[in-house]
Image: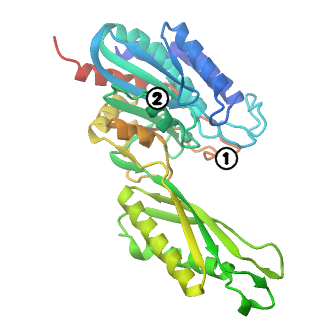
Amino acid sequence: MSDQLKERIRQLLPRTIETRRHLHMHPELSDHESETAALVARRLRELGLEPRTGIGGHGVVADIAGRAPGPTIALRADMDALPIQEETGLPYASVNPGVMHACGHDGHTAMMLAVAEILSEEMRTRAGTVRLLFQPAEETVGGAPRMIADGALKGVQTVIALHGWRHLPVGHIGVMAGPSMAGADVFDITVRGHGAHAAYPHQSSDPIVTAARIVTALQTVVSREMDPLDPAVLTVARISGGTAYNIIPDTAHLAGTVRTLSRDVADRIEAAMRRIVEGECVAAGATGEVVYHRGSPPVVNDPAIVELVREAGVLSVGPDAVTDLLRPSMGAEDFAYMLREAPGAMYRLGIGDGAPGHNAGFDFDDRAIPAGIETLCRSALLFVERHSARP
Ligand code: NI
């Protein structure tokens, strides 16, 4: 079947590239993926599948049932684009001003449509079900939890996804067990002092000075309070307050993000932040408010499923092109929510060293498409074969 599968992928490649470039040219922002979802649903119907639409927003879900009941594996692709004005100059560059596929989700979606076509054929001789999840709103971290709430992961034994990755050669596969991408929280801090004429600071409690102290004090949370072996980031990304040269304002605002590889570390950072804000505000005769929003959890890959993906990778691209990733990424990915519903894995597909993701010069490298399709197909087939009862 190995050569057969590669041959089938070769046949599907021109149309997959065409689809990928069509999606690239017509990107849609998170929660506006109506045209993309319509294209996906239409193509799935052409394959004889019965896609369910409107799942968690513009999400599309389709089951590919085998010839007999058995295990269910879900494969997920994200569909949304980013609010960036494309500057690639490509013939298939975005025609939607200010919207761009700068994270490669066009590639993910196009590859998954080819996977749908191949697995529709392959599952005729196998037991079990492959469920395809076309997810909206990954970039705004809303799509995955909403699809789960709409039952997309019900009855699923495992869930797998890939993401294009620049730091791997084109078509290589990177796997990592355990925590591999960060959880991402955001926070807002308000410092309420009291304002005065800027020439009479003794009549104020200056929230600008207090906010500055808080920014400095927060620098020791990671460096002095966290175990150096627990990766963590605390970034104050926004600071604002005041309106004029000669007015000390009443309030100042800080906002930013916290990235960690475990909920426990995030809990400790939140507690330290609350303590520091309160302490600095008390010292300054001000009051402080911290609003800490829990974002997506860390991506924690199941070791057994990672082994399965590794095997699929070796069969697809050979052992030399499968890499054990040694360092997690502090980027976030809302696929993490799905991994809380079922053990599974996100792996990385090398797209070489072009422009970075979320950049106006980014383009998904079409040369990575065959490896992406084959590893997804093989992961699904290995799983249903291994977990079906033998006759
Ligand atoms: Ni992405």
Q: Nearer the viewer, residue 179 or 89?
A: 179
The amino acid at mark 1 is Asn
Instruction: Looking at the picture, tell me which residue is in the foreground, 118 or 46.
Output: 46
Q: Residue at x 35, y 7 (%)?
A: 124
Camera-nearest label, 2 or 1: 2
Image region (quadrant) for ligand 1: top right
Residue 203 visible in the snapshot: yes
Q: Is residue 353 above or below residue 111?
A: below
Quadrant of res 229: bottom left
Q: Which residue is mark 2?
A: 150
Expressed as whole percent of the image width and height from the top left, the position of residue 41 reads 57, 16
Vertical order, 307 against 155 (above or below): below
Disc 1 element: loop
Residue at the image position 58 percent from the left and 77 percent from the top: 287
Name the residue: 63% across, 24% down.
36
Q: Position of residue 106 (x, y in %)?
A: 60, 30
- Say what secondary structure mark 2 lies in: loop
Instruction: Tell me if 66 is positioned left or right of 117 in this view.
Output: left
Label of residue 359 in the image: 1
* Amino acid type shown at disc 2: Asp
Depicted 242 relative to depicted 333: above or below: below
Q: Residue at x 49, y 77 (%)?
A: 276
